[in-house]
Image (cartoon, rainbow, N blue to C red):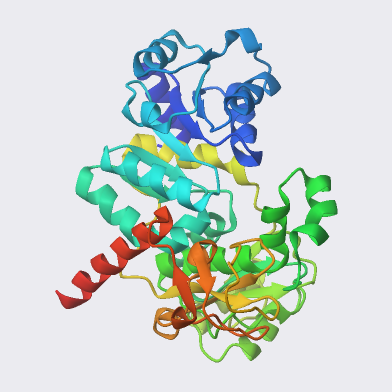
Amino acid sequence: MTVWSRHQDFVARQGPIKVGIIGAGYVGAGLVHLLDQLEGFRPAVVVNRTVDRAVGAYVASGNSAAEVVVACTQSELEVAIEAGRPAVTADPDLVIAADGLDVLVEATGALDYGAAVMLSALTAGRAVVSINAEVDATIGWLLHTTAVEHGGVYTICDGDQPGVLMRTLDHVRHMGFAPLVAANCKRHLDIRQTPESSAPYAARDGTSPLVTTAAGDGTKMNIENAVVANLAGMPPDCRGMNGVPTTLEHAVQDVLATVSRTGVVEYTLGGDFAAGVFVIACPPEVASVQRALRFFKMGDGPDYLFFRPYTMVHFEMPLSLAEVVLDRRPLWQPAAPPVADVIAVAKHSLQAGERLDGIGGHSCYGQIDSVEASRDLLPIALSHHARLTRDIPRDEPIALDAVEIDENGPIVELRRRQDVLLGATSAS
């Protein structure tokens, strides 16, 4: 049976999949609209720190504001879920504890808030589907371990680059090919981009300047590839990866000529890839399949390009939601401890005493590197909880001994917990 035929059976027995959506921003509001129109799903509740924005997500999808229940207690929320009325709340704990929900979606993209909410949900044994690559790249091992320990489910999802690359890697491997490179396709890169220079693009796209800056300066792409690296066991070839200028026609030759080894994550610059991703892979016995692959218009080999030309974020998430609810298993989970991290690099010359402003800000951009090479450097995810104790030249990685870190920051505390967990894992 296909996923969707099994989903149909589930709906016939238990009704639509009831989803709690955490975050009413670009992705969260889009998911509310999609699930409201899609048979077999129901966006049962939206959590947002600004309740009016959560109500607005329902209104934008065709509900009247008067229909929406603003829940302040768990009983109010559960009554609304049972009655099939759209509900909103500012308190994620109500959603984590509520009966009647099948799965939660973390769609905020926020580090501190998203990490804390997901950990609480997993500790309570909930199923959590996350679009939050920033949190996964920072404490993914902790989240997976917590889910297993408490009977929850934690997974990244379809639609964003990490999920699409993982689907492509799965597809390629189960056709008998060995992946050589998993690549994220980037149209342009400006490591000096700021929230001010990002403002016109943010206004055009309906995103925030911080999100747009993180995309433009490459931090977002490095984070996405770190997620893939840690799930697939494919480290970067070098710090920040190579960034190969190429086109679809020449990608196989150009990328393989650039990387120093295979089994790595990488990215391309420019070209005709749109917002796609690809995997370069080879069959174990080229000669035995070369004729068939040529007939199937895959080229002469010996290495082949498997290209996915789009990533459609919330439009693709229902597949993840259905699979997680039906199987109570993550779509992907790491088989081994992390192989990559994303470090903070000075965007301009920084001065002692300066407080860093984190992902998508003015002070630093993120670059992926191996865990070993990152060990004494500041993770980009902790940078908005850090203050410099000495000057840092432009484009120099920020060392841990060059900063004071606020240990009370939620993501800092959770990263420390993961470090202890990984230390125990390596010692056992």
> Is 285 rendered above or below residue 230?
below
From this view, report whether residue 317 is shown above or below residue 38. below
Q: Quadrant of the N terminus?
A: top left
Q: Residue at x 40, y 12 (%)?
A: 76
What is the residue that sits farthest to the left in this orientation?
A: 428
Q: Quadrant of residue 279?
A: bottom right
Decide which of 10, 194 is in the foreground and name it: 194
Q: How many marks?
A: 0
Q: Quadrant of the C terminus?
A: bottom left
Residue 229 is left or right of residue 394, and the answer is left
Residue depicted at x 65% and y 61%: 360
Measured from the top left, where is residue 141 in percent x and y?
34, 61
Q: Is residue 146 left or right of residue 403?
A: left
- Provide residue 72's location: percent of width, then percent of height: 43, 18
Residue 276, quarter of the rendered image: bottom right
Towards the viewer: 168 or 422:
422
Give the vertical position of 212 relative to 96 (above or below). below
Q: Position of residue 309 (x, y in %)?
A: 70, 58
Extreme-front residue of the structure = 353
Q: Residue at x 67, y 22 (%)?
A: 61
Q: Is residue 145 visible?
A: yes
Residue 295 vs 149, above or below: the answer is below
Q: Position of residue 41 (x, y in %)?
A: 50, 25
